[in-house]
Image (cartoon, rainbow, N blue to C red):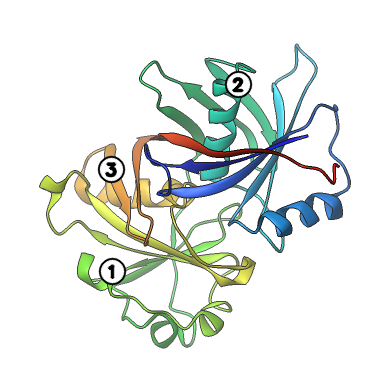
Amino acid sequence: MKIRIVDAFTDRPFAGNPAGVVLLDSGAFPEADRLQLVASEVNLSETAFAHPLPPGGEADWALRWFTPVTEVDLCGHATLATAHVLRTTGTASGTVRYATRSGILRTTAHDDGTLTLDFPTAPLTPVPAPPGLADALGASPLSLHDTGEHIGDLLVELAGEAAVRALRPDFHALAVCSRRGVIATAPAEDPTRGYDFVSRGFFPAVGIDEDPVTGSAHTALAPFWSARFGRDDLVGLQTSARSGLVRTALRGERTLLTGSAVTVIDGELLAGL
């Protein structure tokens, strides 16, 4: 069985966010504990597992995502990586529909090599700061928003790009501040550099101290910054050590996320599923 490592939200290897991708031949998933073992072995922020569905239904593939320690409801970069593998292997082209825990998702492959994810827009609800957040994060928030059931993050606005880049969180303390993670964000210091806002994503509660590029977080970042800037189409830079760009397009209840991907490892899963 093939297993691939794909760098997502980048057009060059060893940047962006790496994801494992396993395409299953069968029409059903193995037991969840088996998938979790593989994801733990891969030990990336997410490993995606997908299998084809019968033709004529509302989706073409079933898709699930696992961190090294748990299954999650939504993952952008591993979905982008899956769509990239489907396209580059000739398994699928154009628009592909996926049945997931977050409903039906779509990806569209473009002639220039980029891929667009069609995801639900995250609802944003202003919330008070949980006890100890500022100390755990190492910065004082300007505003905080809950991002809803499927994302489960706390969106934290900081004073500026320099404050986001300088963060050195206490991950153990940060793990209790939200259901999934904390997204720190601020406007770009210089928009002429090709991005409108910056972010970093910390997810110690699900086994990921810092995620290199978090696609799902941009379904919350897009409505947040679109409301501030008065524009629906933006570019976000997730300023992790690996870094990556996400083009966001707010379309009401849906958010489109566009990026590139590169396969860096194409191997065989000897233990099987």
Q: Quadrant of residue 186?
A: bottom left
Please tell me how crowded label 2 is: few (under 14), some (14-19), or many (20+) other residues with Cα within 10 Å.
Answer: few
Tell me the kind of residue under disc 1.
Answer: Arg
* Residue that mark 2 sits on: 89
Q: Is residue 62 left or right of residue 255?
A: right
* Residue sitting at x 12%, y 54%: 190
Tell me the kind of residue under disc 3.
Answer: Val
Q: Return the disc, 3 or 2, that comes first in the chain's sequence.
A: 2
User: Which structural element holds mark 3?
Assistant: strand
- Between marks 3 and 2, how big is the CA–CA gap? 29 Å
User: Percent from the top left, x then y, of residue 108?
Assistant: 49, 22
* Residue that mark 3 sits on: 235
User: Percent from the top left, x then y, of residue 19?
Assistant: 57, 47
* Residue that mark 1 sits on: 165
Q: Which of the image's four quarters has the N terminus?
A: top right
Give the number of the mark in front: 3 or 2.
2
Give the number of the mark in front: 2 or 1.
2
User: Percent from the top left, x then y, of residue 6?
Assistant: 54, 40
